[in-house]
Amino acid sequence: MEKIFPNIGVILILLLFALYLHRLFRFILPVENLADNRKYIKLARYLFLVAAIVYSLQYIGGIPLSSTSARVITHLVLSGIVLIISLCFVIITKGNRWQYAAIGGFVLSVIGAGYCFNEKLASSMPFEITLSETQIELRGGYTLNIPFATASGIVLENKFPDVAYRSNGISVKDKNIGYYVLNNGKKCFLFLNNKSSPFIHIERINDIPVFINCSTPEETVRLYRQILIVGKYK
């Protein structure tokens, strides 16, 4: 089974904010201020819910959005969330500097925790490419086996794939693993440890193309030559 924890994790976080944002404000701010500005909190909760729905449709549902549409939707949702929550903070706190400090500390803590989690996930994520006599085996957040018999072409390229958006995959720091959609609307599978060229482009018979690379350019070139030898490609 494919591992899509990062996608599901983001959706769950957004849903938790949508469900428990009122309790979060109640923990930080006086109850009387919450009662006066309940409508702003409700609007912010709705925006978190919209963000969760958009994220799930775009990345897990894999709806065919153009790259421009995907970026516009994402930016609008995120901008709306930031705007409404900022407005809530300003109105509810009514200038109390200690409450501003509490909110600021909370926001910085969330950002810091998210950054640390992202760094930890990137460093601990498995990333392994092995060759057998019959296939290329990719092991990481996603797994994929590419039989040599199904590969119609293998090319070493210096240009990063023209990716429009992620359909169902993992993007942590420079690692991109899973299913993505190219600017031409076609799907592909990425198993990239970083965005440094070169990249090994594998075309498959009756299946989507695959792009892979290693930690360093030298390792990628070495892997490419090994694939040509083991797979008996000219």
Image (tube, helix red, strand yellow):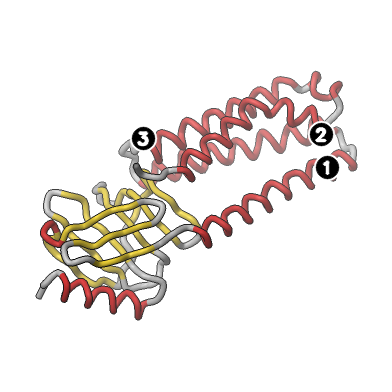
Looking at the rendered structure, the secondary structure element under dot 3 is loop
Task: Tell me the distance, in whole angstroms, between the alpha carbons under discs 2 and 1.
Answer: 7 Å
List x then y, in percent, for residue 203: 17, 59
Residue located beneath label 1 in the image: 102
Task: Tell me the distance, in whole angstroms, between the alpha carbons under discs 3 and 1.
Answer: 38 Å
| Residue in the image at 41% along x and 72% along y | 215
Q: For the residue carrying disc 1, how many other residues have a C-alpha within 10 Å: few (<14), some (14-19), or many (20+)?
A: few
- Taking 193 as reference, is 112 above or below it? above
Q: For the residue carrying disc 3, how many other residues have a C-alpha within 10 Å: few (<14), some (14-19), or many (20+)?
A: few
State left or right for residue 86 relative to residue 46. right
Q: Which tag, 3 or 1, sits closer to the chain's start? A: 3
Residue located beneath label 3 in the image: 61
State left or right for residue 105 relative to residue 85. right
| Residue in the image at 50% along x and 60% along y | 173
Amino acid type, mark 1: Ala
State which quadrant residue 103 falls in. Answer: top right
Q: Are marks 2 and 1 in contact (CB under 8 Å)?
A: yes
List x then y, in percent, for residue 128: 37, 63
Q: Who is closer to the viewer here, 200 or 165?
A: 200
- Taking 4 as reference, is 128 above or below it? below
Looking at the rendered structure, the secondary structure element under dot 2 is helix
| Residue in the image at 63% along x and 25% along y | 19
Residue located beneath label 2 in the image: 28
Q: For the residue carrying disc 2, how many other residues have a C-alpha within 10 Å: few (<14), some (14-19), or many (20+)?
A: some
Quadrant placement of the N terminus = top left
